[in-house]
Image (cartoon, rainbow, N blue to C red):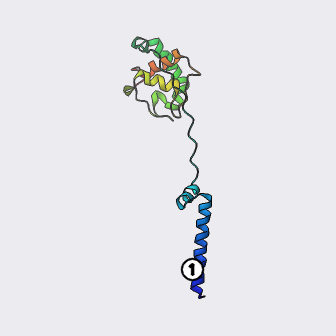
Amino acid sequence: MPYGMTLRAAFVVFALALAALAAATGASTQGVAQSAAPASTPAAAPEPPRDPPPALPAAVLKDPKVIAGGEALWKENCAHCHGSKAYPGKAPKLQPHKYKPEFVWDRVHNGFRDMPAWKELYNDEQVISLVAWVMSEEFWP
């Protein structure tokens, strides 16, 4: 047999062996390519339910004593990330004129992305005072 025929025969035998192996393992050429890809990461754990905000009456949010309490808490635990009067800092600059009090309460109480939830540290009245401070005219830079 000529040399070219021997090489061709070897190639055919190899291709048949590869096809038989793929059939035996139930893989196709697409399946082999897909199985070589890394396995997808497991789904992230579902986020715990978010606590709904309590009533946030305007009279409470405008109360000077409530606002002063929120300012003190802000200076104690918020200013080091959000900066003095919310800028500059490690966290985004706040834009209270775009927020509703319920939104601020949710972010402080339940947290968001890298911001921790403060519900374990602050009770509802303290979170409301922070909302009052952030929403106050004195807060806006």
- Against 52, residue 15 (above or below) is below
Q: Classify residue 120 by image quadrant.
A: top right
- Against 135, residue 94 (above or below) is below
Task: Say what amino acid the circle numbered 1 marks.
Answer: Arg
Using a 10 Å C-alpha cutoff, classify the residue at mark 1 as few (fewer than 14 neighbours), some (14 to 19) or many (20 or more).
Answer: few
Comparing 70 with 15, the one in front is: 15
In the current view of this chain or complex, which residue is farthest to the left?
Answer: 97
Q: Position of residue 11 (x, y in %)?
A: 58, 76
Q: Classify residue 23 by image quadrant.
A: bottom right
Q: Classify residue 59 by image quadrant.
A: top left
Q: Position of residue 94 (x, y in %)?
A: 43, 30
Quick one: quadrant of the N terminus?
bottom right
Q: Position of residue 127 (x, y in %)?
A: 51, 19
Q: Position of residue 64 (x, y in %)?
A: 44, 12
Residue at 52 percent of width and 16 percent of height: 124
Q: Which residue is mark 1?
A: 8
Residue at 57 percent of width and 84 percent of height: 5
